Image (tube, grey):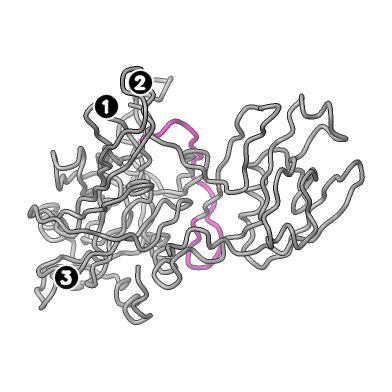
Amino acid sequence: MTDYNEFNWNEEESPVPEPQPAPAQLYTENVLKPKNGKKKKGGAKLAVGVVCGALVGSLVSTAVVMGAFGVNGKNRVATMFESGRKAESVNTTKVSTVVNDPGQELTTREIARLVGPSVVGISCTVQYQNNFYFFGGTQTAISSGSGVIISDTGHIVTNYHVINGGSDIKVKFNNGDEYPATLVGGDEQSDLAVLKIDPVDGMTVAVLGDSDLVEVGDRAVAIGNPLGDELFGTTTQGIISGKNRTVTVDNRQMNLLQTDAAINNGNSGGALINAYGEVIGINSVKISSSVSSSGSVEGLGFAIPINEVKTVVNDLINYGYVTGKPLIGINVQPITNEMALYLPVNHGLYVFGVTKDSAAEKAGVQRGDIIISFDGQEVNTNTELNTLRDKHKAGDTVEMVIDRNGQRLTLQIVLSEDSSAKVN
C-alpha cells in the first residue's frame, strides 16, 4: 500500500536550486475549538504513518491516495445544520429527511436503513506520473471515496483528498443511479470539500449532530464505500475510542475523533454516526498495521468532528473558501550547513521569494532576508513558522525579526487573508 500523491500544505515553501537541502517537514495547525472558544487540551498526539481512505485504481496498479456550496442564503444554512434525535424517515416532494425525536436511540439496523441512503459514492478521474519502467509517463486512474448529502439542494460533503486534482466528478446513490457533480469549494487544511448535484427525487439528507456532546464509549456506526463499488454502502459498528486525537497526516496536524468501527480505503468522506442517527464525523483516515514497527495495529480509524465540518462548510457556502486563514506571502527555506557557509547567520529561514502586494511585502520583507524569529519565538523550520502563524487570524499584527546583510531589523506584519482556495 503506497501513497499516490502528497499534499503541499504550505504555500510558503519553495525548493532551493543550489544547494539542495533535505525537504522540510511541513504541516498546518488545525485546532478544534469548543463552543466557549477555548482550545481543547489533552488527547494523545500521534505521528505515525496513516492511510487515507480514498481508493485509486488503474489498469496497471492500485494505490492509496489522501484522497464546498453555492450561496443559498443564511436561512438555508441554518436549517441544514439543525441537529436532533431522529426516529423515522419522512418523504417530501423532493427529498427524504428525518424527524427529530429527542432521546430516541436507534438500532444499528434502523441507522443503516434511515441514514444509509444519505451516504453516496464519489468518483473522479485523476492523472498521475507513473514511474514504472515499462509504463512510464502520465497515467489516468479513477479516485473513489464516499460523501454525505447534507442539504435538500444537493450539497454533499466529502474529503478534499478524494477529489483533489480530479475531474469529471460523479456521485453514485445506493440504488445505482449516478449523477454529475461540481466542486463548489474545498479546503486542504481541514481535508474537506463540498460538491453540488441537482436535487433528486427521493434523495435522503443526513442530519448533523453535535460532536462536542460525544463521549468515549458512545456507540459509533460508520457507513461508506470501501473498495468503491465492490462493497458499496458498507455499515460497521464500534464505539468512540478517543476524542481530540492529534494525528499528523502528511505533515499537518488534525484533531480527530477516534473509533474502532472499521474504516477502510474508499470510506473517506463517509459518515460516522451516533446512536441517534446523527452524523458526528466525516471519516478521513485510518492507521495501517503495515506502517507500525511495534506490532500489528487494528481498529484505529479517525473522523473529522462534525462541528468543525459545519464551520468549514459554512464558509465554503458563503464565501467559497475558509475565511480568516492568515497569510504572510513569502517563500522560505530552512538554512542548511552548506548555506550557512555563505550567510551572515547559521540559523533561521531564508526568504527566496516575496509575493507581490502581500503582507510580507507591505511590511518591507525582501528576497534574501533571513527570518530569525516570528511572534517572539525563534524559527528554524517551515513547520515552526506555520504553527506560529496559524495561531493568529487574518488582520492580526505579528512581530518578525529578520537579518538583512548582518543587520537585525524588527518588522510588523499585518497578516492578510488566504483566499487562494476559492473556486472561480
Which amino acid type is shown beneath numbered disc 1?
Ser
Which amino acid type is shown beneath numbered disc 3?
Thr
Is residue 47 inside the magenta stretch? Answer: yes
Closer-to-camera residue (255/316): 316
At x 75% / y 54%, what residue is drawn? 375
Closer-to-camera residue (190/281): 190
In this rendering, does residue 217 appear at all?
A: no
Which amino acid type is shown beneath numbered disc 2?
Phe
Q: Which residue is mark 2?
A: 132
In this rendering, does residue 23 appear at all?
A: yes
Q: Residues within 10 Å of mark 1 (few under 14, many from 20)?
A: few
Q: Position of residue 312 (x, y in %)?
A: 43, 63
Q: Which residue is mark 3?
A: 97
**Residue 72, quarter of the rendered image:** bottom left
Q: Which residues are magenta?
A: 32-51
Measured Cα–Cα span from mark 1 to mark 2: 10 Å
Callout 1–callout 2 Cβ contact below 8 Å: yes
Disc with the residue nearer the chain's start (2 vs 3): 3
Measured Cα–Cα span from mark 2 to mark 3: 48 Å
At x 35% / y 39%, what residue is drawn? 52
Measured Cα–Cα span from mark 1 to mark 3: 40 Å
Q: Which residue is mark 1?
A: 61
Disc with the residue nearer the chain's start (1 vs 2): 1
At x 50% / y 60%, what residue is drawn? 33
Drawn side of residue 27 relative to residue 93, left or right? right
Q: Residues within 10 Å of mark 2 (few under 14, many from 20)?
A: few
Drawn side of residue 90 relative to residue 28, left or right? left
Q: Secondary structure at mark 1?
A: loop
Q: Secondary structure at mark 2?
A: loop
Q: Main secondary structure of the magenta part?
A: loop
